[in-house]
Image (spheres, rainbow, N blue to C red):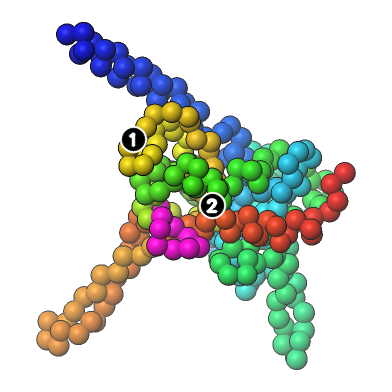
Amino acid sequence: MQTVLRRLSLLFVLTLSATNIRASTLPKGWSAAIVSIEVPPTDQELAAHAGSYRQVGTGFFVSPDEKPPFRAILITAKHVFESACANWPTVYMRFENATSNPTGQPQRFPLQICDRKTQDDKVVSVPKWISHPTVDLAGIIPPPIAPGQTLPSVTVFKSETIAGPEEIKKWEISEGDEVFTISFTPNLVQGRPSSTTVRGGVIANFSEEQDSFIADSFVFPGNSGSPVVLKPTAVHLLNNNVTIGRVNPALLLGVVVEYVPYIDVALSVQTNRPRVSFEENSGLTRVIRGERVKELLQIMAPMLPPNP
């Protein structure tokens, strides 16, 4: 009987501890580091009175500085800037806590991502962003805001919170570990742009790719560039044994670049050849590793204005 009571007591303590840990698993203010990257309506949409700003990606601010004031670099997936630049040299940043303008619309801040120039009688685009040399990752240094605009208070991910090989080894991060994806999900409230949402998931595969890993977490168009964060927990797998001890910090594990599609092929009953293929969201997400974010940060840090 005493053994049973001790086990029940231990279970109660563990449950209470897990509840307390769960209450603060995501650092406060991290959602304020997230930016919705949007493009304006086209002329045709405006003429049809059907146009509105459209989200093409997500970004977040990272700083190489160890102490304030923190200089910020906006990080996102490279293809977000590439696809937007094909039609718009300027995109617009929308923050979760941005104030509304006099018309009631959320305030957006312009961000020029490329220049247009004539070369060999052709108009070409010159990127203002910096690409990682090997992966789908890009960063840009936001210019000073326009007169009359007030940038909302934003948070930055500090370089020390980005998971590299040392942090992965220290906390033995692997398949099954829980993660959060922080992004914008449009139209959560009818007639209003959404605030950031936190979506849970787990690491589905962590060992096959050197530059990326797979998370079991749904993402959709416009979520590319979202940060993926390791959930703090006191439960860890050490030498194949489950242990309860020190709580790992919330770490930036990487950046969403795409969902992994599931493709179903319909065959002809007459020829047995493929006729139609259907592509669906499998619920798996490809994430560029935090180590690559650190590399891009090192490349771009010398380009920042001097720290006062």
Between residues 194 and 272, which one lies in front from this camera angle?
272
Q: Is residue 99 magenta?
A: no
Q: Residue furthest top?
A: 2
Look at 87% across and 44% down and name the residue there: 308
- Relative placement, left or right, of 305 versus 248 is right
Q: Is residue 213 magenta?
A: yes
147 up-or-down from 122: above or below: above
Of pointers 2 and 1, the one earlier in the residue sequence: 2
Numbered disc 1: secondary structure: strand
Q: Which mark is residue 165?
A: 2
Give the class, few, some or many, for how many residues have Cα within 10 Å of label 2's Cα (few <14, many ≥20): few
- CA gap, disc 2 to disc 1? 22 Å
120 up-or-down from 30: above or below: below
Task: Tell me if I can see residue 227 in this picture.
Answer: no
Q: Position of residue 289 (x, y in %)?
A: 52, 56
Q: Position of residue 1 (x, y in %)?
A: 17, 8
In the image, which residues are magenta? 206-216
Q: Position of residue 24 (x, y in %)?
A: 50, 28
Q: Which mark is residue 242?
A: 1
Look at 76% across and 47% down and name the residue there: 71
Look at 41% across and 55% down and name the residue there: 206
Amino acid type, label 1: Val
